[in-house]
């Protein structure tokens, strides 16, 4: 064996080593990176060494002939932007340890995508996909063996009974229990790829002779697919079901339109246009169906209304931190404190991946993922018609996976709000490798024609970035900048002290009186010069109410109200300020019908007013509660006693 032959064989193994290192880093971060609620990661960020080792191995495995083409640089730019926004979010986080734990998971996700993108040949890529398919089957089997069917009520009782019967027939396996929603989200990303493996000839990647053991391998992939589908079914994740169904529908329609993609550019463009029109029609039909369900109060209207409320309040929170985000893995408490205006954690995420990314990583994190999806679509449009049948099928599976993840992200956040984030970028890594291999194998003239001009792609990227920027900052970038800095300073000062488990000792008002909020107030007052941005007015008013500066609080909220803001937090704080200043009936009119109006007011009547012996405002609060709840049995007694202690005359009937 010559030295060149040995060197070539060594280079052939390096991409597999890359994949092994990426999987090892992901496994280390997964095992210690928290569950749905992220916790401090005892393993730290040292597995990043395994991720960083991917690039030297990648460069060492290069051959001039095999690497005449490179990965589309747009992927690296958008992934880099996503990672930089995550780093900025760590800086903004009030709990740095939790934020670093999630940052490790994001490093693992990008490392896994990079290892897949670095697979140089079809055989390397197919072996990597075989590993992923095995992982999907193992995930499904692990879920079936470990899920506690009685832990949470399922939406369909017959599925619960089937799951219990299945578990009874299988051995009990101790260990970490994965949330059914997380399992559903992860499988949605992997299932199209597992399905594509059924149609890839085993001898092309196993090195066997054609026909040898082919049926055994095909049967194994079929069993893997069925096992993953069974786990998805048993997860009862309706969002995962719908998103996978949408991806399958679009994939089936594509196969009907372009079962054999046209090689001629004009016919290819017609096929893409037909698919684009169909996709737009499906999206429009889904929006119309959702609108009809909501407005006509059809079955499912209640669940849809709940999700819409979460999205609305999540977007309101994201507007407070448009540039930096509020901190990785820290959505829950700031959402309760600054958006819902309650004092304990309410929900772990907004059930919308896109809103959660915007809230935790700001404009640049959200835009990076949107542009990453756009780049994958552009690569599909460029290279699918030049790809071989099997490699083209794999590109279709990648796009179906990306569509499923994007749709599922509209109704849940399993692939961002949990350790499932590790596979968020998997389909993009496969698309990178598939496009590069296709580009290398295609006719040079066809490649030159397919590349065309990248000016329009970059122009579109700038339009997306500018539109997101102006939309999230409400067209007031400087006010949003100061509001962001003020919000970060306030969040760090308050939530590093406040303990939601022992929310009464000290309570949030006491925390705001104890900590130094000077820096936060300085930035917020600068932002308040622009009444069109609501963040500063809300937060300054909340601080003023905690300090007993009720006239100042009303002045802040009056400016926000006069500017036209009618979001939930603005209504609640404006109502608080009105009631504290004696405008009870007007305050009740503002907050009537809001979910948290009554419990918040009950807490304020006691903790903010009665306990500190501010009986006059306690009387106003009890009067407001009586107007909101006319059937309160103790309302008259509470009002009378508070007014007596305050030295006020009895309230006229």
Image: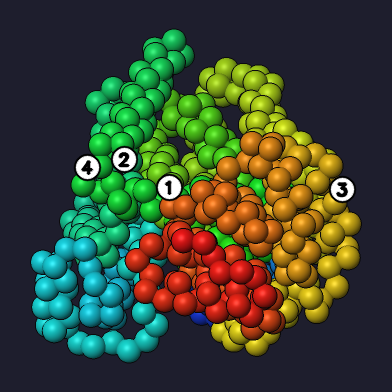
Q: Is residue 548 above or below residue 323?
A: below
At 62% from the left edge and 59% from the top edge, which residue is drawn? 579
Quarter residue 271 falls in: top left
Q: Position of residue 520 (x, y in %)?
A: 83, 61
Element on which disc 3 rests: helix
Sequence-wise, the earlier of marks 1 and 4 is 4
Q: CA distance from mark 3 to mark 4?
A: 46 Å
Nearest the eye: 70 or 498? 498
Element on which disc 2 rests: helix
Nearest the eye: 141 or 318? 318
Query: Dot 3, how many residues are within 10 Å of its Cα: few (below 14), some (14-19), or many (20+)?
Result: some
Element on which disc 1 rests: helix
Sequence-wise, the earlier of marks 3 and 1 is 1
Q: Which residue lies under the disc numbered 1?
A: 308
Q: Which residue lies under the disc numbered 3?
A: 526
Q: Which residue lies under the disc numbered 2?
A: 294
Q: Which residue lies under the disc numbered 4?
A: 298
Q: CA distance from mark 1 to mark 4?
A: 15 Å
Query: Dot 1, how many residues are within 10 Å of its Cα: few (below 14), some (14-19), or many (20+)?
Result: some
Sequence-wise, the earlier of marks 1 and 2 is 2
């Amino acid at each position: 064996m010559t030295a060149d032959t040995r060197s070539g064989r060594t280079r052939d193994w390096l991409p597999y080593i890359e994949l092994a290192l990426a999987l090892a880093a992901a496994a280390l971060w997964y095992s210690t990176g928290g569950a749905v609620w992220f916790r401090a990661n005892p393993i730290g960020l040292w597995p990043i060494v395994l991720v960083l080792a991917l690039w030297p191995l990648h460069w060492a495995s290069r051959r001039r002939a095999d690497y005449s083409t490179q990965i589309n640089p747009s992927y690296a730019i958008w992934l880099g932007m996503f990672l930089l926004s995550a780093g900025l979010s760590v800086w903004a986080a009030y709990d740095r340890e939790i934020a670093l734990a999630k940052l490790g998971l994001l490093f693992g996700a990008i490392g896994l995508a990079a290892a897949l993108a670095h697979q140089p040949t079809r055989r390397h890529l197919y072996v990597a996909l075989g590993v992923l398919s095995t992982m999907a089957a193992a995930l499904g089997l692990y879920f079936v063996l470990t899920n506690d069917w009685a832990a949470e009520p399922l939406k369909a009782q017959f599925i619960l009974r089937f799951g219990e019967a299945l578990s009874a027939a299988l051995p009990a396996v101790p260990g970490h229990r994965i949330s059914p929603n997380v399992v559903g989200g992860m499988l949605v990303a992997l299932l199209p790829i597992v399905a594509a493996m059924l149609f890839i000839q085993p001898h092309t990647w196993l090195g066997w002779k054609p026909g040898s053991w082919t049926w055994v391998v095909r049967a194994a992939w079929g069993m893997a697919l069925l096992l993953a589908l069974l786990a998805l079914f048993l997860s009862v994740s309706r969002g995962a079901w719908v998103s996978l169904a949408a991806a399958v529908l679009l994939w089936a329609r594509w196969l009907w339109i372009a079962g054999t993609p046209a090689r001629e550019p004009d016919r290819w463009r017609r096929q893409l246009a037909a698919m684009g029109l169909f996709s737009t029609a499906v999206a429009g039909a889904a929006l119309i169906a959702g609108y009809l369900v909501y407005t006509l109060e059809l079955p499912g209207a209640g669940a849809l209304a709940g999700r819409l409320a979460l999205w609305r309040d999540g977007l309101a929170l994201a507007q407070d931190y448009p540039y930096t985000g509020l901190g990785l893995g820290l959505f829950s408490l700031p959402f309760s404190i600054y958006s819902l205006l309650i004092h304990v954690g309410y929900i772990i995420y907004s059930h919308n991946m896109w809103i959660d990314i915007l809230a935790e990583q700001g404009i640049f994190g959200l835009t990076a993922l949107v542009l990453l999806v756009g780049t994958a679509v552009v690569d599909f449009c460029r290279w699918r018609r030049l790809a071989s049948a099997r490699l083209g099928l794999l590109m279709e599976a990648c796009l179906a996976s990306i569509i499923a993840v994007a749709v599922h992200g509209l109704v849940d956040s399993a692939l961002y709000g949990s350790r499932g984030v590790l596979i968020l970028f998997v389909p993009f890594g496969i698309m990178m490798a598939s496009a590069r291999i296709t580009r290398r194998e295609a006719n040079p003239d066809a490649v030159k024609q397919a590349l065309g001009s990248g000016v329009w792609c970059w122009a579109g990227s700038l339009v997306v970035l500018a539109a997101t920027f102006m939309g999230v900052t409400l067209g007031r970038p400087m006010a949003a900048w100061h509001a962001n800095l003020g919000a970060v300073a306030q969040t760090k000062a308050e939530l590093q002290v406040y303990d939601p488990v022992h929310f009464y000792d000290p309570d949030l008002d006491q925390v705001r009186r104890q900590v130094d909020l000077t820096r936060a107030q300085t930035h917020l007052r600068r932002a308040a010069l622009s009444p069109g941005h609501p963040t500063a007015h809300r937060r300054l008013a909340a601080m003023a109410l905690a300090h007993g500066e009720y006239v100042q609080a009303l002045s802040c909220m009056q400016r926000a109200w006069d500017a036209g803001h009618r979001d939930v937090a603005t209504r609640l704080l404006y109502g608080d300020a009105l009631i504290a200043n004696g405008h009870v009936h007007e305050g009740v009119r503002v907050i009537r019908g809001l979910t948290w109006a009554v419990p918040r007011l009950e807490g304020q009547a006691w903790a903010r007013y009665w306990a500190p012996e501010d009986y006059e405002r306690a009387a106003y609060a009890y009067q407001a509660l009586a107007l909101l709840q006319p059937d309160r049995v103790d309302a008259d007694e509470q009002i009378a006693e508070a007014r007596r202690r305050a030295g006020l005359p009895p309230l006229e009937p």
